[in-house]
Image (cartoon, rainbow, N blue to C red):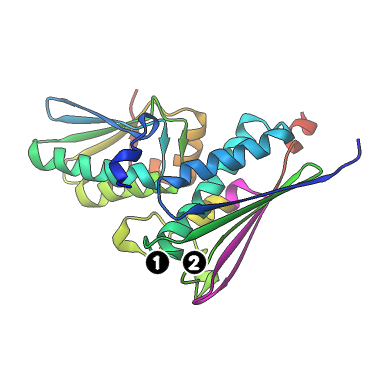
Amino acid sequence: MESITEKMKVELESYSWNVSFARVIVASFLARLDPTVEEMEDVKTAVSEAVTNCVIHGYEGKGGIIEIRCEISGPTIRISIHDDGVGIADIQKAMEPMYTGKPEMNRSGMGFSFMEAFMDEVEVLSRVGEGTTVILRKTIGRTREEV
Amino acid sequence: MREEEHRNPEQTAHYFVSGTTLMVRLPGEVDEYCCKEIRREMTEYLHKRTIQAIVFDFEKTHFMDSSGIGLLLHFYKKWGGQERDIFLSGEDARMERILRMSGIYQIMRHMD
């Protein structure tokens, strides 16, 4: 079968109750790759982490627009999650396990570690004062071929 | 729109007190949105009652992100230790993987 690229884009308001909505939207788009339950949960968890970061860190609870773009190309999904928030000064530090920029908010500091554990690739682009884009990639169906 | 209007049964915890044990039945999906609420509700129970042990029950939980880990760590730091125990129960394979990855089993025990 010829492999085509399919795309979708949604914009959500930065509220914590929209995080579950974001997971459901991406999961429904991902469904066309016929992922296993585990692959589906992996992607949902990573999306949840990235969108929560936009709400808490990017917009600091003040609201704004979160843009989610998904692209399916062959067996691979690429998800980009963008905010126009405060940005990250030190991306390497932000990605360290257990590091949290908001210790007073009872964050675990595991957000990026979860994204890295559940996706094949995690890329972070950010500029202070301009916002942050997290790009997540995962190829579906790898585990099944090995069985 | 007010936050309470968004309360979703999939994201609401239930609490049971038996003797000095508080059992928290976590919701189907545990994320930042419901963790805020659970933190508030649990703190209220811990202030009002004499509680010696907390059990986080995952029986209904099929999704949890790192916000849930933040919730567990919060109560471990604020409340655990000094003869006060925190247990985990009812974790499915997915939850177990997430809890193990986060090192939670090093500070809380599974209880059948």
Quadrant of the image occupied by residue B37: top left
Label 1: which residue?
A: A101
> Counting other residues with Cα less than 10 Å from the Cα at mark 2, is it few (<14), some (14-19), or many (20 or more)?
some
The answer to whether the residues at label 2 and label 1 have Cβ atoms under 8 Å apart is: yes
Q: What stretch is highlighted in magenta?
A: A116-137
**Vertical placement of residue A87 versus A81, above or below:** below
Instruction: Name the residue type under label 2.
Output: Ala
User: Which secondary structure lies at badge 2?
Assistant: helix
Q: Which of B22 and B45 is in front in this view?
A: B45
Query: Residue sitting at 18 percent across and 40 percent down?
Result: B84
Query: Residue sitting at 76 percent across and 28 percent down?
Result: A147
**Label 1 marks which chain's residue?**
A
Instruction: Name the residue type under label 1.
Output: Gly
Which numbered disc, 2 or 1, marks the residue that appears first in the sequence?
2
Q: Chief secondary structure of the magenta span? A: strand
Using the rendered image of the protein, determine whether residue A97 is visible from the camera's viewpoint: no
